[in-house]
Image (cartoon, grey):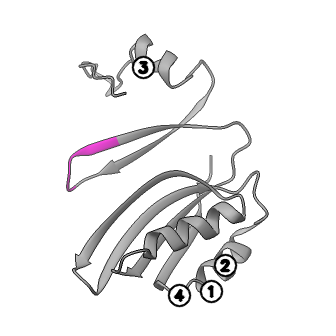
Amino acid sequence: MKIRELVKVDSKGRITIPMIIREALDIHEGMTVLLIADKEKKEIILSPVPERAKLVEVNLKVEDRPGALAEITRTFAEKGVDIIATRCMVIKRGEIGECYMVVDLSKSLITNTAELKELISSLEPVKEYRVSEISP
């Protein structure tokens, strides 16, 4: 279910998240939220972040073929890697695509970025990758 609300930006660039959205996403005072801005699309994604999350940004260049994304996400799921946000797109049909993900390692079998890099490098559809921790 999608909820749509219009809000105004105040003089300091702040917005208030309407109560109906806060309740639907279980956002409460003191909670951390992740904002991802896409300059090209002029879009902001807001995602609540669990307490004690260990967030990592993952940029992938992948083969554009049926099942490539499923293979990657299935492998992440098997290791307990929680995908908080993702955006994938085809760069050249039938050849290459790219995916941007924010993942949470706090409850996964992967304990650090070195292990995550090793896991990603073992994935056949992945041709290039960049991994970096997101600090609170």
Residue 47, x across and y down, in percent: 48, 38
Task: Place residue 4 in its image quadrant.
Answer: top left
Residue at (49, 68) in percent of width and height: 70
Residue at (51, 16) in percent of width and height: 23
Span highlighted in magenta in the image: 40-44
Q: Amino acid type of disc 2? A: Leu
Q: Quadrant of the N terminus?
A: top left
Residue at label 3?
A: 21
Q: What's the distance in space between the residues labelled 1 and 4, CA to CA?
A: 6 Å
Residue 135, x across and y down, in percent: 62, 52
Secondary structure character of the magenta stretch overall:
loop
Judge left or right: residue 2 versus residue 75.
left
Secondary structure at badge 2 equals helix
Q: Amino acid type of disc 3? A: Ile
Q: Are marks 2 and 1 in contact (CB under 8 Å)?
A: yes
Residue at label 1?
A: 122
